[in-house]
């Protein structure tokens, strides 16, 4: 900080009434009716720091902030940094108010918050251990009055306490002396009063500070948000226009007889579709005031014709891959079922036969649909679909894996060796 910042306030009689000391900030005291100032951020103060200012007041008060040395200010710059009114409700006695002043990273002074600090008493119920007096009607013996279950007590401490309560008996008169009654205790609830610090936020009303006040700032923020929303709508509308224009150009090129989709659309459909594309292009450049919704609707109309063509094209690209995948799956599981070897030899023959039957069914299904698909022109609805082949592949794999994962049986334990009885001592061998 290159220019010191000071705050000013009007002194109050409450400052004299309040006890000095014990404040965790700078105490801002003053005589009643006297305007006092103090530098809170001197030259060289680090940025992004805060200081707490402590006041004692009975009602609302004001804090004025300004540059302490206006000689270093740029000509025309105001010395005042604003007035901050602390809205403290009227009090019957002086109350402590902590005000947090902050110097931001941008060297801007601000009053960040104000809090009313009070000490309040509250009651807390605790359990204490109390000794029961001996009962007179039981011949000196004591009885324990019913009490609540005591909280857990450390065993070592209880043992030590019990040993202190016992008196050693004399060796010679152990039976003749009268034994002292055992002490009895109970746990009772005791209400104790304690103190704690209560902090209440107070409203801070700034005025005359540099920059834009809160109402004006909010108004400008609302205007900016509205502009951003309008711009987002404009950008979104342009994106939808580009989508429509790109679709027209792509489909016109790819759906031609020599195009990428040429074999997947009939001549009659191609001719009518090219007419639709031309009309859509004319509308795109001639419509005076199109909207985002209009662009979306026009694109959806064209996709009613183009989407089936594109789907047939993509289906033809993945069909060969799925035929190879299904054939490979059938071959692998058929080999495992017909030649189980040591790995699957423990599985029952009827279960392996079930795998072989399913492999044969899938293979026949695939061969039949391949033959039908080969007869169809590319612009017709295909009969052999990649999704159906994927489903068949998964179903076969799931069924076969359930059978082939059967674990091998455990080998039988080795026969126990018979123990030969040895002759007793003294007997002939």
Image (cartoon, grey):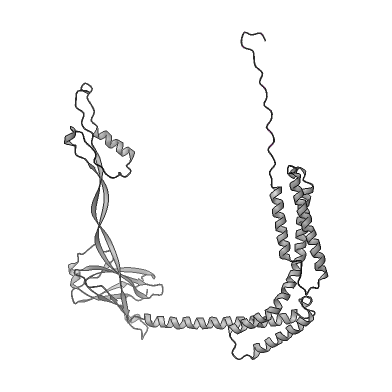
Task: Specify whether residue 332 is in view.
Answer: no
Seen at 64% across and 15% down, the residue is 422
The quarter of the rendered structure image containing the N terminus is bottom left
Where is residue 217? Give x, y as percent: 40, 81
Residue at image point 25% right, 34% down = 164
**Depicted 327 relative to depicted 274: above or below:** above
Q: Answer with the quarter of the image where residue 184 lies.
A: top left
Q: Position of residue 307 (x, y in %)?
A: 70, 76
Can residue 359 be seen by looking at this rendering? yes
Residue drawn 73% across the image and 62% down it: 389
Residue plotted at (31% across, 73% down): 203
Q: Main secondary structure of the magenta part?
A: loop
Instruction: Verify whether residue 416 appears in magenta.
Output: yes
The spot of residue 364 in percent (x, y) is 80, 59
Percent across and percent down for residue 424 are 62, 12
Q: Nearer the viewer, residue 315 or 227?
A: 315
List the single residue furthest toward the left. Answer: 136
Provide the residue span drawn in magenta: 410-429
């Amino acid at each position: 900080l290159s220019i010191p910042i000071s705050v000013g306030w009007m002194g109050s009689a409450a400052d004299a009434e309040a006890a000095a000391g014990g404040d965790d900030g700078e105490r801002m005291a003053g005589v009643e009716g006297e305007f006092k100032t103090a530098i809170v951020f001197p030259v060289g103060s680090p940025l992004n720091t805060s200081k707490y200012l402590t006041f004692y007041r009975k009602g609302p008060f004001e804090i004025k902030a300004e540059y302490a040395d206006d000689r270093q200010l740029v000509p025309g710059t105001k010395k005042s940094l604003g007035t901050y009114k602390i809205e403290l409700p009227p009090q019957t006695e002086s109350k402590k108010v902590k005000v947090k002043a902050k110097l931001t990273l941008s060297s801007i002074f601000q009053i960040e918050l104000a809090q009313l600090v009070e000490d309040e008493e509250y009651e807390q119920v605790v359990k204490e251990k109390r000794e029961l007096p001996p009962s007179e009607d039981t011949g000196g013996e004591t009885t324990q009055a019913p009490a609540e279950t005591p909280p857990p007590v450390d065993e070592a401490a209880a043992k030590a306490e019990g040993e202190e309560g016992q008196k050693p008996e004399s060796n010679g008169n152990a039976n003749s002396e009268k034994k002292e009654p055992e002490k009895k205790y109970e746990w009772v609830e005791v209400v104790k009063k304690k103190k704690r610090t209560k902090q209440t936020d107070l409203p801070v009303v700034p005025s005359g500070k540099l920059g834009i006040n809160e109402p004006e700032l909010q108004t400008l923020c609302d205007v900016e948000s509205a502009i951003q929303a309008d711009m987002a709508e404009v950008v979104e509308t342009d994106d939808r226009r580009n989508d429509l224009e790109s679709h027209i150009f792509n489909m016109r090129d790819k759906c031609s007889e020599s195009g990428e989709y040429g074999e997947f659309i009939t001549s009659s459909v191609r001719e009518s579709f090219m007419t639709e594309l031309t009309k859509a292009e004319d509308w795109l450049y001639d419509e005076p005031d199109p909207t985002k919704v209009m662009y979306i609707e026009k694109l959806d109309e064209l996709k009613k014709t183009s989407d089936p063509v594109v789907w047939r094209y993509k289906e033809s690209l993945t069909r060969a891959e799925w035929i190879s995948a299904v054939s490979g799956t059938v071959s692998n599981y058929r080999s495992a079922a017909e030649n189980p070897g040591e790995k699957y030899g423990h599985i029952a023959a009827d279960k392996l036969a079930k795998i072989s039957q399913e492999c044969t069914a899938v293979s026949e299904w695939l061969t039949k649909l391949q033959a039908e698909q080969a007869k169809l022109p590319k612009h017709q609805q295909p009969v052999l679909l990649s999704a159906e082949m994927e489903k068949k592949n998964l179903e076969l794999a799931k069924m076969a894996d359930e059978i082939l994962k059967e674990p091998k049986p455990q080998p039988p334990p080795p026969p126990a060796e018979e123990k030969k009885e040895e002759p007793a001592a003294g007997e002939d061998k």
